[in-house]
Image (cartoon, helix red, strand yellow):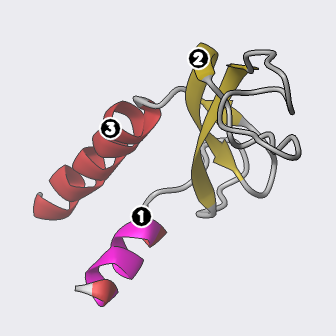
Amino acid sequence: MENDKKSNSKKRHCPICGSNELTMRYEASYVYSYVIDNDAPGLMNDDEFLSYLYDKRELKESRTYIECNNCGTQYPPDFINNVLANEHESHRERALR
């Protein structure tokens, strides 16, 4: 199974530079809120403030993209299904002729 993954990854490449080193990334921006009480900020913080013990977390924005590790070009997430799948399909169709 792992060999199949390696051989499939070689077929996907950046149309700009030709590199097959692509990474899917997810970026997110959150706002963390802490209730101010008698001790450290945050209801879950007692003696000291620990940022991971928040009272509320709100997602403000997020984005998913595919990035070429070689040239840094960024593509929308459907790039892997639309562009790369179509490229692969056209290569396979040519091979069948």
Residue located 53% across and 26% down the image: 76
Vertical order, 43 against 58 (above or below): below
Upstream in the sequence, badge 1 or badge 3?
A: 1
Quadrant the C terminus occupies: bottom left
Residue at image coords 66%, 61%: 19
Q: Nearer the viewer, mark 1 or mark 3?
A: 3
Mark 3 lies on residue: 81
Residue 5 on image: x %, y %: 33, 75
Which image quarter: residue 84?
A: top left
Q: Determine contact: label 1, label 3, CB under 8 Å.
A: no
| Mark 1 vs 2: CB contact within 8 A | no
Q: Nearer the viewer, residue 34 or 57?
A: 34
Which residue is labeled 2 in the image? Answer: 59
- Is 18 in front, or is 37? 37
* Residue 22 located within the stretch drawn in magenta: no
Residue 1 rendering spot, x and y as whole percentages: 22, 85
Most distant residue in the front direction: 38
Residue 95, placed above or below residue 82: below
Q: Is residue 16 above or below residue 31?
A: below
Q: Quarter-wise, where is residue 91 in the image?
A: bottom left
Asked where in the image residue 80 lies, by quadrant, the reply is top left
Does dot 3 land on a helix, a strand or a loop? Answer: helix
The residue drawn where x is 85% and y is 46% is 47
Q: Which residues are magenta?
A: 3-9
Distance between the alpha carbons at the discs numbered 3 and 2: 27 Å
Label 1: which residue? 11
